[in-house]
Image (cartoon, rainbow, N blue to C red):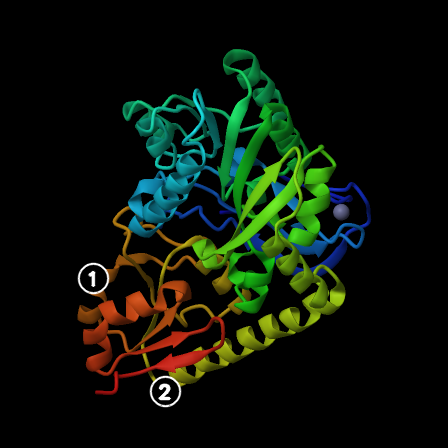
Amino acid sequence: MITTAPHRSITACRSCGAGPLETLMAFGQSPLADRLTVPGGSDPEYRAPLTLCHCPACSLCQLRETVEPDILFHSAYPYFSSVSPALVAHFTDSAQCLIDSFSQASDVFVVEAASNDGTMLAPFQAAGHRVLGIDPAAAPVAEARRKGIPTDQVFFTAGHARHIRDRHGPADLFIANNVLAHVADVNDFVAGIAILLKDQGCAVIEVPSLMALVDDCAFDTIYHQHLLYLSLTALAPLFSRHGLVLTDAEKVWVHGGSFRLRIARHGAPSARLLDLMAEEARRDMGTRAFFDPFLQRIRTLCDETRAAVTDLANQGMRIAAYGAAAKGTTLLHMLDLPAGALRHVYDKSPWKAGKAMPGSGLVIRPASELSRDDVDAVLLLAWNFADEILSENRRFLEAGGQFLIPVPKLRHVRRPTP
Ligand SMILES: [Zn+2]
């Protein structure tokens, strides 16, 4: 049963409040990307309109629709930061640099929004600092508390920032990784940072980069959870509205390309921040001229991929997909392949096997079955892990199988050359 998810549509910019927003691309009624379904089950399959817009006034790229968070962030399996070794290493390194910067200070108070299972806070606590995590998801919060990391099970808001300040005092350091882009009331979140920080405190925030998304044509990372697509051009006025200054930005690899930002009450922009902002200005970031080639590339990529799948099917090949992650839902929705074009989808997560992807209804099979199944070709939805997945499936390739990798540019991968 397909049900429209409860949502509201904004008419003014989520940051500066100006309107109207300019539509960049309407994705239609798109399935909620993370909600796997149970084949034959009675749970409704939620869909909601998905419309990418930008604000002509402050340049913020954003979704027009906000889906009810209780429905959107419902998840049948909990997500733990500590499951990805590469991410753990990234956040541990980042924590160590920050710990080094506080080596002369005493009684340092560190607060992290979206702290998950406490992976990032643990090194601060081990270094003797006071820490507090904030996260709305029950299972990761329980895991953080089990590890001895105090964690409030709430969304971070200005109201909760006041509560923390009253209870624990102001923070020397506020951390928020990969959460700002999910926040519907972004002014309230940034106001919370301003309330919480000491006069000499700083916030270190990681956000996915809009420029990286556009350069990789990673349009499949546009889905309902990601309300904001961030540039430095749009972020600087957001922070300054709340009496904060963006003082530094550094490119990091996480989530296909992100910025690690530093925000404080005082300070001048770093040289590398000025360079990155100059690069955005040079590329007309946030204007229609910046987006038009990207939008055309999405259409071309979808047309070419659809034609390639159809061509393989016409040759009698049995085709499956690989990677039942959220981005695969958007990609399959945009490809709009004929029913039956793909047989099922493989995924490495044991939690997902036996469930089905929303929208396409493709049933998820364990990735280990690929070389044993009667499949000739695989459409790789998890294109960001292409190298890893190709090397894990050499046997499939050596047996004559082939991969279609749609993003950033459609390519076929066949038997490896010796
Ligand atoms: Zn705006």
Q: Residues within 10 Å of mark 1 (few under 14, many from 20)?
A: few
> Could you say whether the residue bearing mark 1 is in a helix, strand or loop?
helix
Vertical position of residue 2 compared to residue 403: above or below: above
Rendered image: mark on residue 150: none
Outermost residue on the top side: it is 167
**What is the three-letter code of the residue carrying label 1?**
Ser
The verdict on label 2 being within 8 Å of ligand 1 is no
Rendered image: mark on residue 368: 1
Vertical position of residue 42 compared to residue 289: above or below: above
Horizontal arrangement in the rendering, residue 55 relative to residue 71 (left or right): right
* Alpha carbons under labels 1 and 2: distance apart: 26 Å
- Identified at 76% across, 52% down, the residue is 55
- Identified at 62% across, 27% down, the residue is 192
**Residue, disc 2:** 315
Vertical position of residue 416 compared to residue 118: above or below: below
Horizontal arrangement in the rendering, residue 352 relative to residue 222 (left or right): left
Q: Is residue 10 visible?
A: yes
Q: Which of marks 2 and 1 precedes in the sequence?
A: 2
Pick the front one: 36 or 253: 253
- Identified at 27% across, 58% down, the residue is 365
Q: Mark 1 touching mark 2, by CB under 8 A?
A: no
- Identified at 49% across, 81% down, the residue is 307
Horizontal arrangement in the rendering, residue 60 relative to residue 146 (left or right): right
Q: Give how far across and how far down residue 336 sits, in percent.
A: 52, 67
> Could you say whether the residue bearing mark 2 is in a helix, strand or loop?
loop
Horizontal arrangement in the rendering, residue 6 relative to residue 258 (left or right): right
